[in-house]
Image: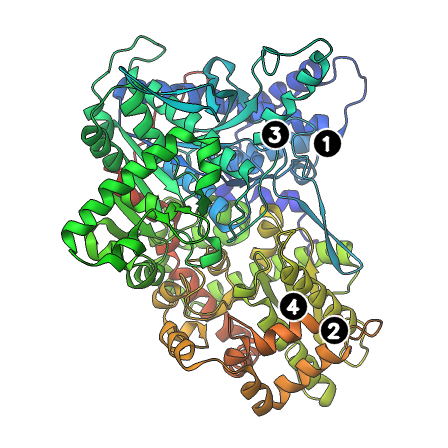
Amino acid sequence: MSKPLSDHDRRKQISVRGLAGTENISALKTDFNRHLHFTLVKDRNVATRRDYFFALAHTVREHLIGRWIRTQQHYYEKDPKRLYYISLEFYMGRTLQNTMVNLALENTCDEAMYQLGLDMEELEDMEEDAGLGNGGLGRLAACFLDSMASLGLAGYGYGIRYEFGIFNQKIVNGWQVEEADDWLRFGNPWEKARPEYMRPVQFYGKTEQTPDGVKWVDTQTVLALPYDTPVPGYRNNYVNTMRLWSAKAPCDFNLKDFNVGGYIQAVLDRNLAENISRVLYPNDNFFEGKELRLKQEYFVVSATLQDIIRRFKVSKFGSREIVRTDFSKLPDKVAIQLNDTHPAMAIPELMRVLVDEEKLQWDVAWDICVRTCAYTNHTVLPEALERWPVDLFAQLLPRHLEIVYEINRRHLERVAKMFPGDHDRLRRMSLIEEGGQKRINMAHMSIVGSHAVNGVARIHSDILKATLFKDFYEMEPTKFQNKTNGITPRRWLVMCNPGLAEVIAERIGEEFIRDLDQLQSLRNFVNDEAFIRDVAKVKQENKLKFAVHLEEHYKVKINPNSMFDIQVKRIHEYKRQLLNCLHIITYYNRIKKEPNKQWTPRTVMIGGKAAPGYHTAKMIIRLITAIGEVVNNDPVVGDRLKVIFLENYRVTLAERAIPAADLSQQISTAGTEASGTGNMKFMLNGALTIGTMDGANVEMAEEAGEENFFIFGMRVDDVDAMDKKGYNALEYYNHLPELKQAIDQIAGGFFSPKQHDLFKEIVNMLMNHDRYKVFADYEDYMKCQEKVNALYKNPKEWTKMVIQNIAGCGKFSSDRTITEYARDIWGMEPTMESLPAPDDL
């Protein structure tokens, strides 16, 4: 029997990784050695693994630079309309492997490193994740940047270069402990500081009426220093830019009026200004109305708009001569997309620039503003909506408060004209919420100041029109659209699951990587024995690889033939990790009751971070780890059920876990998850989904066929009906013996023998004030899980269903999403043509 291929030899056979010519390998080794010797180890004899990583990153980066310059040159010459995607979060993960995939360098680099005696995967593991996001919203922004570049759109991502990204999660004695994510401590090989484009940002001060218009005076200045990161398209020679701003104190900060001896303190106080870009707020779907957060939001918006207007004014490459001053053309050359309301300050700031600085009439400026801006809503949860106290605004941004009041005055005049005498409607639609502390509703401002408003899945967009934004929809129905989210198939298939990408490419060619709809033709292979075998084999290999990783990290013996049942996402009550826990406990109880029955073995993995201030979410993590402690050490159960909490879930862990999953859990209460994107990643990587009819699950079931999806639970209408009637958890507790047993075990200390009442708050919440109705879906969920178990016992039928799911994934490419944004909102047209490769490559 031939010995199994090494990882390196197996990778070599994968054609989607790019062809490795001998000349290319030799040139790459030369470049690598040059970087190693001259840029890294000038004064050391021995190179570390980190030195090797940086040498490789700089070598790969060289292949980007020529394309990057060429792309910017192309944009200046053609002067296309440009799209500015403003987001407080860009959850990029690692860059090295993604760059190699998009430049078709993977096999070349792999072979060059192999010949130099280095292990490619070890080097890739040296890279820090760029964790500048909390979850879905930030990762969506990253996928969108990949698609914009791959579609040849002049798209720019603008955000903040946080010194500390999302915290690293450690599990200590079963509890989450946060650690600062010092991701820049070894340097970032992909960024380039651009001090020549530094911009001043103003805060505080007051306004003055002058003959020349309103002036904002006596402000404090913070400088915004841009760092650029290249964003390569997929094998089309386009390289776009993500520009992240870092806060710097000006040289004279606090020194103008320092008294004798105040100099040292004044220099130390520079930190106060620079704190703006220090740390990402770690909340997902929760608004925390802190001054520093509002500063961050205005900081990114002010610096970005200055950059947009500078670029609008100059059109020739390399020239700073002002050539364009007619702002009526701004909406023809600029589109601004607001990723949620976090950058909504762009609306009053653009008005301030046009009216106060460029001296346009209000009506003219407003028309330009609305035609330029568009807003994406990401949530309907009331606690997530941004509502800033007017007092805070008045202090921090006094001119913007005046502008918001004027926007509101004119807006309410229009409402009154359309709906005369409807005073309650005026109150509901106002940008200013009265009563108690006055607040500015940022979603209302975003709608009024934009020409397009979209939700992120069909059901979500429908809910916006029917509930949250009903009044606005009645007033301007054509403003509201849907743009169902998508994911980039480059990172989420070719890069993280090359084995699956290869078996697909062997059947239908490689074009699907740029046109994911081509996966539909896999339906022709649903009954193809060889294809079924190949898909199952790739899944088994991915599971074995992940099992090794798990056994190293968690010291739990994994049965690789068990079903890998995975729920990874932020820990939140609405995502219902507790429903998953109830299934685990019930399944455990059933095995204990009939230990000799043929149970379908499962390894249940749950992962995700809890916001540091979200007590209930942290208790949910503690419950999961407690269940694991009991289940994993019960000899009666053996390897038929294991429970693992995946520590520090992040992009890089997702890239390992998702390709290994058999079952994907997407079990939020119907009407709460705007879209979800993890759901799409699992589907594309050959997992089956158990889920509610929520978010994009609805469209995924439609594309795959409902018969190929494990759907359970209440629909949105059922939830609404239950809200009217009243949800009574006690009824379910009394009528479902297995549910009662599970809750009694949690409440009675079965999972916390040292502290019997450890989980009393969770039980109290579930029994008395559960907004997300966990018990109402329990019975149907358990029945649905039995269907999952039955199918898993028939591997061939399971794999056929997997193939149907993969074949239905085309719609969920971010290329499709971005093409829709471009055509329907931005007035731009994607291209499938490539730019010429730079001469020196």
The residue that mark 1 highlights is: 117
- Three-letter code for the amino acid on which mark 2 is drawn: Asp
Residue 836: x %, y % from top left: 35, 23
**What is the C-alpha distance between the residues marked 3 and 1?**
43 Å
Residue at the image position 44 percent from the left and 52 percent from the top: 385
Give the mark nearest the N terminus, 4 or 1: 1
Picture layout, residue 336 above or below residue 803: above
**What is the C-alpha distance between the residues marked 4 and 1?**
38 Å
Nearest to the eye among marks 4 and 2: give it.
Answer: 4
Q: Provide the secondary structure element on which disc 2 rests.
A: helix
Nearest to the eye among marks 4 and 1: give it.
Answer: 4
Nearest to the eye among marks 3 and 4: give it.
Answer: 3
Quadrant assignment for the N terminus: bottom right
- Of 763 and 63, nearer the camera is 763
Q: Residues within 10 Å of mark 2 (few under 14, many from 20)?
A: many
Q: Which mark is residue 639?
A: 2
- Of 362 and 12, nearer the camera is 362
The image quadrant that residue 311 belongs to is top left
Residue 841: x %, y % from top left: 46, 20
**What is the C-alpha distance between the residues marked 3 and 2?**
49 Å
Give the mark nearest the N terminus, 3 or 4: 3
Residue 225: x %, y % from top left: 52, 21
The image quadrant that residue 402 belongs to is top left
Picture layout, residue 501 above or below residue 334: below
**What is the C-alpha distance between the residues marked 2 and 1?**
39 Å
* Residues marked 2 and 1 touching at CB (< 8 Å): no
The residue that mark 3 highlights is: 275
Q: Which mark is residue 33?
A: none
Q: Is residue 51 left or right of residue 783?
A: right
The image quadrant that residue 421 belongs to is bottom left
Give the mark nearest the N terminus, 4 or 2: 4
